[in-house]
Amino acid sequence: MKLGFIGTGNMASAIMGGVIKKNIFPAEEIIGADLFAPGRERVKEQFGINVTDSNKEVIEKAEVVILSVKPQFYADVIAEIKDIVKPEQLIITIAPGKTLTWLADQFGKAVKITRTMPNTPAMVGEGMTAACPNEHMTEEEIAYVKTILESFSRVEVVPEKLMDAVTAVSGSSPAYVYMMIEAMADAAVSGGMPRPQAYKFAAQAVLGSAKMVLETGKHPGELKDMVCSPAGTTIEAVRTLEELGFRSSIIEAMKVCEEVSKSM
C-alpha cells in the first residue's frame, strides 16, 4: 500500500477523493482504518479503498500514513503504533495544537513527520493547507507530501510558529464565512428573495470575490473600492458595517481562535 489513513472521517474522505481523482494513488493502493464499522464501510463503498479495523495494519502496509483522528485521540493512537513505525515511513498529522515537539515526545524516536492544517473546503477540492515538516524530512520527501496535499488543496509550507494563526485564518474560518453567507441570505429573504435562491446568490458572491483576490493579485481594499461608487449603495453598506464593528469582530474572533489553538 502507498497511502494509509488512521481515521476515515470527513477530512480523510476529502483527501482520499483528491488523491484518487488526481491519480496520485489508485484506490487499491490506499488503506483506511476505523474502529467504527459504518465509517470504514462508507469509504470502502465510496472510493473502493481497502479498509480494516486495525491501526497497526495500516502502519505495517502503508508508506505514507495520515493520522486523521480527532486531536483527543492522538496520544492513544500514537501509543498503539509507535513501536512499529518504520524509519522510512512518512507521517502526516492534521490535528490543531499538536506540535512537532509534542508529536516527537509521543513517538519517542526519530520519525518523519509533517504537521498540517487543512480545512473543510478540501471536500470540494478548494482547501487551503499549511504544512510544517520536521527536521527528519528531506526536500524530496517534503515535495512528495506537498504533491499529496495539492490533490485537494492549495498548499503553503510555513514555520511552525504560524500554525495557530493558520488555524484561525483558514482552519476555522469556513465557519465564519458560512455565518456571513447565512446572514446575507437572511437579508435577501427579508427583501423578498426565495431562500434557496438567496443562498445561491450569497454563496456565489463570496466564491467569486475570493477568486478575484487570488487570481488578480489586487489588494482586497482595492477590489472593495472598485465596487464602491461615489454616493452609491455599496459605500453606504460598507459605512454601516464599519459602524457596527464588522472588521473588529472578525479580528477579535480570530484572535480568540488562535489563543484556543495554542492551549490545545
Image: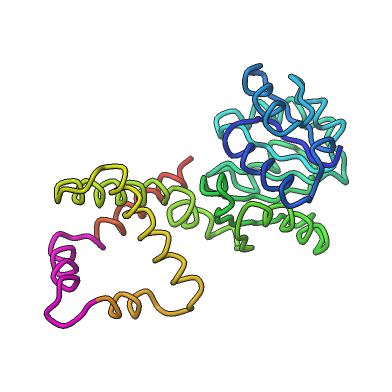
In the rendered image, residue 218, in percent from the top left (x then y), is placed at 43, 80
In the rendered image, residue 75, in percent from the top left (x then y), is placed at 63, 30
Q: In this view, does 213 lie to the left or right of 199?
A: right
Is residue 35 located in the magenta-colored stretch of the structure?
A: no
Identify the main secondary structure in magenta.
helix
Residue drawn 61% across the image and 55% down it: 153
The span picked out in magenta is 228-247
Could you say which is closer to the camera, residue 122 or residue 6? 122
Asked if residue 42 is positioned above or below residue 147 in the image, the reply reads above
Could you say which is closer to the camera, residue 78 or residue 156? 156
Q: Splitting the image into 4 quarters, where does residue 1 fall?
A: top right
Badge count: 0
Residue drawn 76% across the image and 31% down it: 48
Q: In this view, does 178 lie to the left or right of 189?
A: right
Is residue 232 located in the magenta-colored stretch of the structure?
A: yes
Asked if residue 33 is positioned above or below residue 154 in the image, the reply reads above
Q: Splitting the image into 4 quarters, where does residue 247 fall?
A: bottom left
Residue drawn 41% across the image and 51% down it: 173
Could you say which is closer to the camera, residue 60 or residue 219? 219
Residue most extreme to the bottom: 230
Q: In this view, does 193 lie to the left or right of 123?
A: left
Colour scheme employed for the rendering of this structure:
rainbow
